[in-house]
Amino acid sequence: MLQLSHYPSAIAQAAQRVNEVDSQLMAVQHQINRFEGNADRVSAFESDLKNDAQRKARRFEVLLVNQEYQKSMDTLIRLTAEKQNAIAHLEYLRNQFSVAKLEARLAIVQQLNDFEARELVGL
């Protein structure tokens, strides 16, 4: 458990990590969108494809053989899990900070009660 004064910076660092992973996620999603757009373009302009089902199948084939697309999808999955873990860590720190503040308040109240009790007894 951290000292009370260290929580704000730890929380800020954890929030920054969530933002960094989110930024990486957006970049990968943009790359995936480009691959999918290219696959759509390829399937749309092939004249031997007669209907939407054939175009969708061709799009799937184009994406299936694209190693960079597959790698990007793997990265997307990994980064999504990493972001969820970073969010969980951030929430953990926030909750720990709340608990630490409550414990500090309780300690102050107990000290005040002890002081008042000694004053009443005349110590």
Image: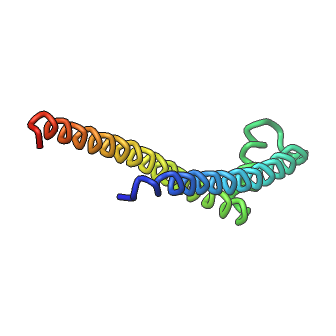
The quadrant of the rendering that contains the C terminus is top left
Residue displayed at 71% across by 56% down:
28
Residue displayed at 72% across by 46% down:
57
In the image, residue 21 above or below residue 99: below
Point out the residue furthest to the top here: 120
Q: Which of 39 and 52 is in front in this view?
A: 39
Colour scheme in use: rainbow
Q: Nearer the viewer, residue 82 or 8?
A: 8
x then y, percent, for residue 35: 78, 54
Point out the residue furthest to the front here: 122
Q: Which of 101 and 69 is in front in this view?
A: 101
x then y, percent, for residue 67: 70, 66
Residue displayed at 82% across by 48% down:
37
Question: Is residue 96 left or right of 86 when viewed as pictured?
Answer: left
**Count of numbered circles on the image:** 0
Question: Is residue 55 left or right of 85 when viewed as pictured?
Answer: right
Point out the residue furthest to the left here: 121
The quadrant of the rendering that contains the N terminus is bottom left
Q: Which of 56 and 118 is in front in this view?
A: 118
In the image, residue 118 above or below residue 85: above
Question: Is residue 13 left or right of 101 when viewed as pictured?
Answer: right
Residue displayed at 86% across by 43% down:
44
x then y, percent, for residue 111: 23, 43
Q: In which quarter of the image is residue 106?
A: top left
x then y, percent, for residue 110: 22, 41
